[in-house]
Image: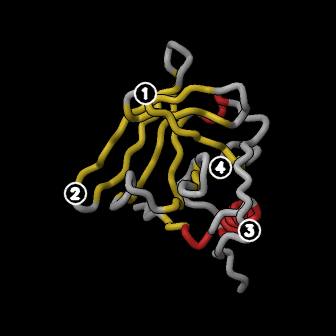
Amino acid sequence: MKSFFSKRRSDHLDIKPVENLEIERYLGVWYELARFENRFERGLTDVMAEYSLKEDGSIKVENSGWNTKKGIRSRIIGHAKTTSMQGLLRVSFFWKFYSDYRVLMIDNDYQWSLVGAGNSDYLWILSRNTSLSQDTIEKIITEAHKRGYDTSKFVFSIMN
């Protein structure tokens, strides 16, 4: 079987977000199926995010995951704002420090998405369900690889 987990093919990283993101359709619950390991999520399983529209037009972002060391569900609440570029949000969990949230690929029915940041350190596969077909996962990983990501860095989340 062909391996879909491979090192980055080139030094070029394509972080261009999708051109037609409909925020209203993106709102709701997303389950993290895979991620590049990062210090914010280390030790977490059953990770999910919920996006909801606030009265001021910004987006409430609530991330949570099962903390395996503490035996509790950890939560953090932040907010996001849209930008003039479709598919690019600016997200903050810490005071006024914002990071890119780039929807790089999304299913026509908004059932799964590939999300990155402004660099190659962060990448997530999100789904409306706790699993996706192997064909869909391979399609997403192939796209990430084409964009220059080191797909061998994917860590698949445990969903109970």
Find the distance from the CA under tag 1 to the CA under tag 3. 34 Å
Find the distance from the CA under tag 3 to the CA under tag 4. 23 Å
Label drawn at residue 96:
1
**Between discs 1 and 3, the one toward the N terminus:** 3
| Residue behind mark 4 | 113
Q: Position of residue 24 (x, y in %)?
A: 64, 27
Report helix, strand or loop for mark 4: strand
Please say if the residues under marks 2 and 3 sit with CB atoms less than 8 Å apart: no
| Residue behind mark 3 | 10
| Horizontal side of residue 65 vs 11, given as left or right | left
Foreground: disc 4 or disc 1: 1
View extreme (bottom): residue: 1
Q: Position of residue 40 (x, y in %)?
A: 38, 51
* Residue kind at label 4, given as amino acid type: Ser
Report helix, strand or loop for mark 2: loop
Report helix, strand or loop for mark 3: loop
